[in-house]
Image (cartoon, grey):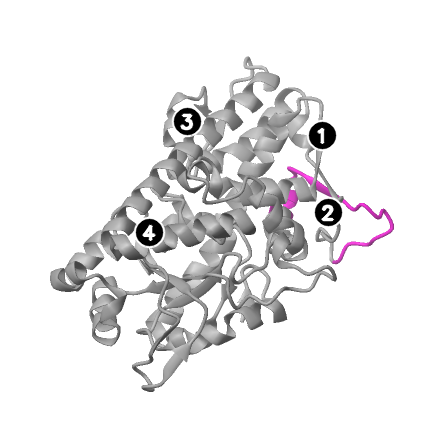
Amino acid sequence: MVVDGGQVDVEVMAAAVEDDREVLRSLPPATMVWGYGSGVVPQARDLGEDGDAAAPAQRLRDYILVVEDAREWHAENMRRHPTHYPWWMRSAGARAVRWVQRTGAAAYFVPLLPSKWASATGGSSVTHASIKYGVIEAADLLEDLVTWRHFYIAGRLHKPAVRLPAIESTEATARAHAEALWRAQRQHNLLNATRLALLASVAEDAGASAVPLSALLERIAGLSYLSDIRFRLGLEQSDKVWRIVQPNFARFAEIYREPIGTLAGQGLLQVVPYASTRATSRGEPTLADPDDLLDFSPLTAPGDRGMAALSKLVNPLLALDPFQSVAERTAIVPTGPGGRLIPPDDPLTQVRPALALACLTALRRRVMWRSIAQAGKGLASTGVGRSIAYLQRKWRSGRRTGGSG
């Protein structure tokens, strides 16, 4: 078991998912399997007074299964577990399920599995807390990680997530695709989330030249919740982001050490340890304290130097799918092979907040419509009764602990 981005064994996460292994193994093989949400990664109210994780047995646990061919996967899963699908989806067949899956956010979710059901692999009854699993094709997830086309699963993977390689397919093609997805997660998804959060931090206060690490991580964790319909319906608490980051700071810091190091290597920021005597290792930034500062003064420098730094930060973002309209509307001109630079007659003090607002607005719109589409698809694909039960549980969970996913 590894935590996304960090390859770190986490006992509290292992305890949360151990009971689900047999359930997940009874499903058809998947290229990758991820566990995410508060049922797997504890949030603030899930922790006891001593900081240890409370028993997660009653929490809804969320999993993502990445598959090679959704039609083949659903056909086999219908044979093994027909009750995971409403009767009309079974009647329509696996081809129709795949068509439904690829609408909206390109994922198909099965919520609230019964607490006890027969495992087709061994014939035994399996008892576990309620779980929800989603299915997405490897090609669709790769596109989402690299381009943010849907910004649905990609956004969920901005937070600590548990990968379960022990129950993943061992076929060579699946292994190769899993490695490609792992690289895309680190080199594109996490890095672009860091870029956008840094841009927003730079634009927030015109006089600031640094941001605490904890504030940047909270901003990253909040990107996938911008205008999420679940918040508007009261299914999540307003302080959910803080509850995710606060007890998991060390995991977040480990996950984002690499992308922050990449931006530091590009001369866009510098890590300033809160404890000034703490040494760095091999020149890499050391992230260990919520009060560590990220000095982004190169991005606030006057004149051409500041313009060049801002362009280096923004250009990769403008290539992402949600920001195509921003790139078309923004006063950006070509300069060199594949490069763009903001015209020097636009004051930086105006350009930074304008770019940040435009990008966040575009992403907010993407999150809102994808969450609405996915909610509507869930109602049609899982049945009214199970959908209502899931929403009721989410609402109770949101009132009690800040939600699960």
Q: Earlier in the sequence, mark 2 or mark 1?
A: 1
Q: Which residues are magenta?
A: 261-281
Whether tag 2 and tag 1 are in contact, CB under 8 A, the answer is no
Label 1: few (<14), some (14–19) or many (≥20) C-alpha neighbours in 10 Å? some
Q: Is residue 228 left or right of residue 309?
A: left
Circle 4 is placed at which residue position? 388
| Disc nearest the viewer among 4 and 3 | 4
Which residue extends farthest left?
91
- Tell me the amino acid under the disc marked 4: Ile
| Residue at 53 percent of width and 28 percent of height | 356
Label 4, label 1: how many angstroms apart (C-alpha)? 48 Å
Circle 3 is placed at which residue position? 326
- Tell me the amino acid under the disc marked 1: Ser
Circle 2 is placed at which residue position? 290
For the residue labelled by badge 2, is the local secondary structure a helix, a strand or a loop? Answer: loop
Residue 267 falls within the magenta-colored stretch: yes
Label 3, label 1: how many angstroms apart (C-alpha)? 25 Å
| Residue at 33 percent of width and 40 percent of height | 372
| Residue at 31 percent of width and 53 percent of height | 387
Whether tag 3 and tag 2 are in contact, CB under 8 A, the answer is no
Q: Earlier in the sequence, mark 3 or mark 1?
A: 1
Circle 1 is placed at which residue position? 209
For the residue labelled by badge 3, is the local secondary structure a helix, a strand or a loop? Answer: helix
**Residue 44: % across, % down:** 63, 53
For the residue labelled by badge 1, is the local secondary structure a helix, a strand or a loop? Answer: loop
